[in-house]
Image (cartoon, grey):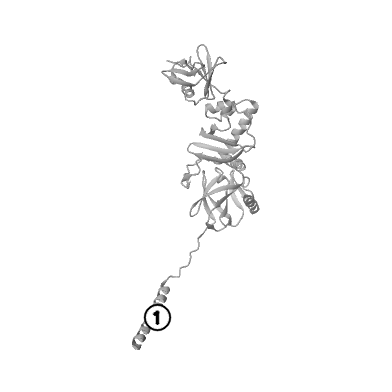
Amino acid sequence: MKKFILICIVLFLAACSDSTEKATWVAQNIPNEKKELAPTYPAEVAVYSPNVNTIGQIIKQKEREKWILVNAQDVAGHPNVLVHNSLLTLGEIVAVDEVNNISLIHIRNSTKFEVAEIVPYTTTRNGGQVTATSQQIEALLQQAIDEPIDWQQRYEKNRTLLQELDREPHENFTTHYNKNIFTYNSDELKYAANQFINKLNTAIDKHYYDELNLLISSDDVKEEMTYVTSPINGFKIKEAKREGVYYFVNGVDENKEEVRLTFILEDQLYKLIGANIINTDALIDEKVVTIDVIEQKKLSEVPALEMFANKHLTNIKIKTTDLTWQLSYKDNKIAVQKDGEASYSCNEALIQNNQFTIIGCGPQNASVPLVKLK
């Protein structure tokens, strides 16, 4: 029995010894991997703009934020650029010194760059060399950090720089998040919206709308604008964007009321096709569609009659050979006037067999065939 117990103890110790040795062997074979450090990229980066592709220099880096010095004329065609290192990064022009022909681009990403020393920067402008001193570059950098340029200043400065160039925009299909960012210039769109509001206010003041009409593409909107009697003061733009063929500018006036404008691009001009600055409900007594049935012989030529019958129009004026009728929807009834005088009210309007009839009129609820077209 003692021998048996002794054998068991020996076997147990041997097993423990094997386990420890095996564990040591496994541990010795696990590689001691070192974590790879993220690469540091050169200070020079490729910069893509609508007109040319150029080179910029990272002159300031603070965690994810970077500022890039670049030739101002090279990037003057758009408020944004694309910066290329390992990936494409969207950048914004945040400072412009048009006299010394330098701009600063701001980007945000996690890439680590070398930082170029700020030294005098020479470019060519108007056929001659322009050199920005180190102090001028540092001053512009501080301005970009403390108070980035607003879109209006950027638009004016970039326009000055572009006027000196004889350069055609090239087809640049560089994309960011699968979208071509150079299909339109948001600063130009905002400028067009501001110009429209300014001209609208002038038209209201002078009661003269012909110049304003040059900026409007829709005849209906041209007519509606003549009913705007209050100027849009203190207009501030919150957003400018493109969706398909339409361009939208959203802003507020001095009373924080929403102002929404819709444009299309026509002959290289942004032209208005819609706005929310008109309260159409307030125009019921003023804005009335007039139908001259003497001139129009077929019902298909008078879509307004059908629109009134289906309640898409609240007012309509119908000129016949002898009389002028005015019909208005009021309190779910149709108020009928004959040559400007109150006549009666009816329950509904109906179009059938080329005949426009109002039904349920007067005390007897009669049907009145008002217009018949052949």
Whether residue 75 is visible to the viewer of this picture, yes or no, is yes
- For the C terminus, the quadrant is top left
Whether residue 168 is visible to the viewer of this picture, yes or no, is no
Pick the residue in front: 28 or 130. 28
What residue does disc 1 label?
Answer: 17
Furthest toward the bottom, the residue is 2
- For the N terminus, the quadrant is bottom left
The percent coordinates of residue 337 (x first, y second) are 55, 17
Residue 45 drawn above or below residue 268: below
Residue 160 drawn above or below residue 212: below
Residue 17 drawn above or below residue 325: below
Pick the residue in front: 370 or 233. 370
The percent coordinates of residue 334 (x first, y second) are 52, 21
The percent coordinates of residue 290 (x first, y second) are 52, 19
Callout 1: helix, strand or loop? Answer: helix
Give the total of numbered labels. 1
Q: Give the left or right position of residue 170, taking residue 62 as reference.
A: left
Q: For the residue carrying disc 1, how many other residues have a C-alpha within 10 Å: few (<14), some (14-19), or many (20+)?
A: few
**Residue 76's quadrant in the figure?**
top right
Furthest toward the front, the residue is 364
What's the residue type where badge 1 is placed? Ser
Pick the residue in front: 282 or 102. 282
**Residue 61's quadrant in the figure?**
bottom right
The percent coordinates of residue 356 (x first, y second) are 46, 18
Pick the residue in front: 119 or 347. 347
